[in-house]
Amino acid sequence: MKQVTNERYAEILDTHKNNEYHLVLKGWQVPILHGLIALAADHPGIKAMDQPTKQLIAQVRLWCKDKFRSWGFTPQQVEYLDKMREETHEANSK
C-alpha cells in the first residue's frame, strides 16, 4: 500500500485550497451535523488546532443555527438546543 507523505498531502492540498465545494443536506441531517460539529469542537485534539479549524467549526455551527432560525426557532430556542446538547454530553460523560 502506498503511503501519503506530508509533502504530497501539502502539494495536493495547495492545488485545491481555493476550490469551493457545496454539500446538500436533508433537513433531518442538519441537527446531526450541528451535533457532530459540536462533539468535534469538544475534542481535546481539535481544541489544540489552529485558527483555520476553529473558523470552519464556527462557520458550520453558525450555518446550522441560521438554518434553525429560518425554520422558526427563536434565537433563545436555538441557544437552548446547544444547552440541551451540552447537558446530554455531560450526562453521558459520567
Image (cartoon, grey):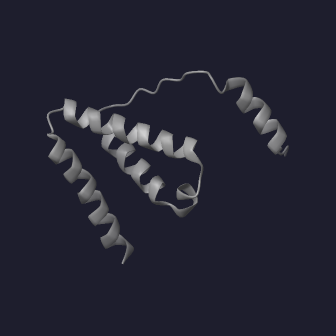
Q: Outermost residue toward the front?
A: 51
Visible residue check, residue 4: no
Q: Residue at x 28, y 39 (%)?
A: 65
Number of residue marks: 0
The quadrant holding residue 46 is bottom right
In the figure, is residue 32 to the left or right of 78?
right
Q: Is residue 52 above or below residue 46?
A: above
The quadrant holding residue 17 is top right
Q: Outermost residue toward the bottom?
A: 94
Query: In what quadrant of the picture does the C terminus appear?
Result: bottom left
Q: Outermost residue toward the top?
A: 19
Visible residue check, residue 45: yes
> 27 or 72: which is nearer to us?
72
Q: Position of residue 42 (x, y in %)?
A: 45, 59
Q: Is residue 46 above or below residue 10?
A: below
In the figure, is residue 6 to the left or right of 27?
right
Q: Position of residue 60 (x, y in %)?
A: 41, 38
Q: Residue at x 46, y 44 (%)?
A: 57
Q: Residue at x 20, y 53 (%)?
A: 80
> 94 or 18: which is nearer to us?
18
In the figure, is residue 35 to the left or right of 53?
left
Q: Position of residue 21 (x, y in %)?
A: 53, 23
Q: Position of residue 71 (x, y in %)?
A: 18, 32
